[in-house]
Amino acid sequence: MRLLTTLLAVVLCTTLPARADDLDEASKLLKAGQRDQALERVNRVLAQKKDDPKARFLKGVILTEQGNTKEAIDTFTKLTQDYPNLPEPYNNLAVIYAGQGQYEKARAALEQSIRTHPSYATAYENLGDVYAKLASQAYDKALQLDKSNTGAQNKLSLVRDLVGGPTAVAAVKPEPVKPEPPVAAEKPPVTAAVENPAAQPQNTNTSADVLKAVNAWAQAWSKKDADAYLAFYAKDFKTPGSEAREQWEKTRRERIAAPKSISVAVEQPKVTMQGTDQASVSFRQSYRSDKLKSSSRKTLVMTRAEGRWLIREENSK
Amino acid sequence: MKILARLSTLLTALLLSAAALAATPEDRLAEVYASVEANRLDEALGRIDALLHDYPNFRLAHLVRGDLLLARARPLETFGNVVKTVPQEKIEGLRAEALARLRGKRERPADDDAPRTVLQLNASQKHVLLIDSRRSRLYVFANEDGRARYVADYYVTLGKNGIDKTREGDQKTPVGVYHVTANLPRSKLTDFYGAGAFPINYPNEWDRRRGRNGHGIWLHGVPSDVYSRAPRASDGCIVLANADLQSVAPMLQVGLTPVIIADEIEWSDARSVEAERRSLAAAIEQWRADWQSRDTERYLAHYSKRFSSDKQDYAAWAAHKRGVNAGKRWIEVGVADVAMFRYPREGDFVMVTFEQAYRSDSLKNTMQKRQYWIREDGAWKIVYEGAA
């Protein structure tokens, strides 16, 4: 289950740049694994503005990662009370509950998250995992199996960013970066050099190839061509939660087959070359099907094998 | 007006809750299936949650709940879509139970259906139990002027190895016509037997004559940690959910209530059953009259050449009867309280039980008699006779 880690209430960001810097710093520290320092920064922000939702959210994430479950629950719970329209705190509460094996509570929190934000993809995915867990518990009761497996690793995602509920989204004037039109799969990709002037000089042709592969991957997905889609994953692809490759492929096929139509667009891609045969591509993935609409940040770690760029890691935020 | 409206709302609510109380767990499971069929999955999950709240040990309901939850995460591939590697027979048992319960609910006998096996109940027998092994179902019929009127039916568990018991330890449920021989209350039993137990008289005369053995075939309940067991799970006993056993128990009369176990209940109509009853009743009446007439050869003509009693074959029986009847100046035979049941798997073969009042110039004796009648070349003949 994915924990949401960044509450990007951008409105507040832009109005309070100093605070935003501190929070960004805290966020970076957290990513670098320096949780104590990250907490210190967040507490500094909160000392000035104790109700700041983004800071409170980040604090909840830090507490969660520190294993301070009780306070993390407390932090997220209060956020849901003060900002009942934000889906992320519910999601993260659910992740914590699921981690404790309290799947009914996790389910309730995720359903709440979806109620506030009906197109919230992460909560849907997490809810799917929670339902699978609840199903497994029900089967155990049906077959009188012991519960030794309960509490086994959860696949739920903690969200690290507070993106904001519908209200926040409506108010958002996106990040300082100029909004780029979605890169439709057919269009030639915008080169990384343009997108990411700060990046080190790199072989534009190579990064263009990487992007081409990413776009082709998105296109295969959009066409619901599971074979072509799966062919973009390297043999040593790190499946989420170290799931068996076969099982992962099966689930992917089901997820691709389920909707009537899918459209995936890669927006604002940034390619970072790591040597000649490895690259990481970060972008905003805009997913749309007849059932679901979502937008999330994604990073693909790509590797070149036999002349093709293939996905070795796929990380969503 | 307002008060009236509120009253009627209250009444409706009361009636609805009373209906919910009256619905059996099986009825409620059927409602869950109905919701699933109507694609109202949230309603289905709500119903199964409520059912499990009331019957937390109903394992099949847990399995259905697992499916309803899993369906929200991914498409189901099968009923009882257990993901883990588990002993398949456990899942198969629950699947079979689901199927049996569903069939049992959907294939209720029609109003004019009469079980062909129940030709006649005697006046003391208030009920008869029929067990349909293929459907894993026990049907209760009430005695209405000697004929069977449907009352209720229940899911039952039978032997691990099916039916037609022949040997001790074969884990099969016998096929035949039996009756309840005792009432063992819960207090005298271990938890395994649940709400109570009613032994039946396996092996009966016909089983013994065919060399069948084994013992301890009971109707009983289930342990407290389960609501029901798989359709084929007992060592030969007939197992009911405790609540079901408690519903059936007050209808059972020790020494009287027939328990008929068959592959399948053969349904007929009242008129055909009555025709068959009359044809056999006429044969029995002729047998009685011929015995009373002291025309021993006519009397013996009612016995099959394959006849045997517990001690004698046909020849010995005939010789004995010729001797006895020759010494009598007069005989009077009364036949009353007749019960007749067609015997499963044996074709035109009927177990008859009655009260026989025998009087002669030298003897007076009243007894419960059992005979097995078979149709040979179109005529009813006796193949077994003894005390019941």
Image (cartoon, helix red, strand yellow):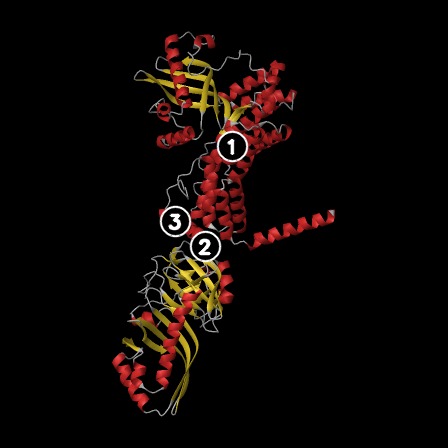
Q: Amino acid at mark 1?
A: Val
Q: Position of residue A98 (x, y in %)?
A: 50, 35
Measure the alpha-carbon separation of dots 2 and 1: 36 Å
Q: Position of residue B118 (x, y in %)?
A: 42, 67
In-image side of B83 versus B326 (left or right): right
Crowd rating for badge 1 (residues with CA inside 10 Å; few <14, some 14–19, many 20+): many
Q: Observer-nearest residue: B226 or B257?
A: B257
Q: Observer-nearest residue: A8 or A114?
A: A114
Q: Position of residue B54 (x, y in %)?
A: 54, 51
Q: Nearer the viewer, mark 3 or mark 1?
A: 3
In-image side of B81 versus B384 (left or right): right
Measure the alpha-carbon separation of dots 3 and 1: 32 Å
Tag 1, which secondary structure?
helix
| Disc 3 target residue | B90
Q: In the rendered view, tell whether residue A62 sits above or below residue B281.
A: above
Q: Quadrant of residue A12?
A: top right
Crowd rating for badge 2 (residues with CA inside 10 Å; few <14, some 14–19, many 20+): many
Q: Is residue B88 visible?
A: yes
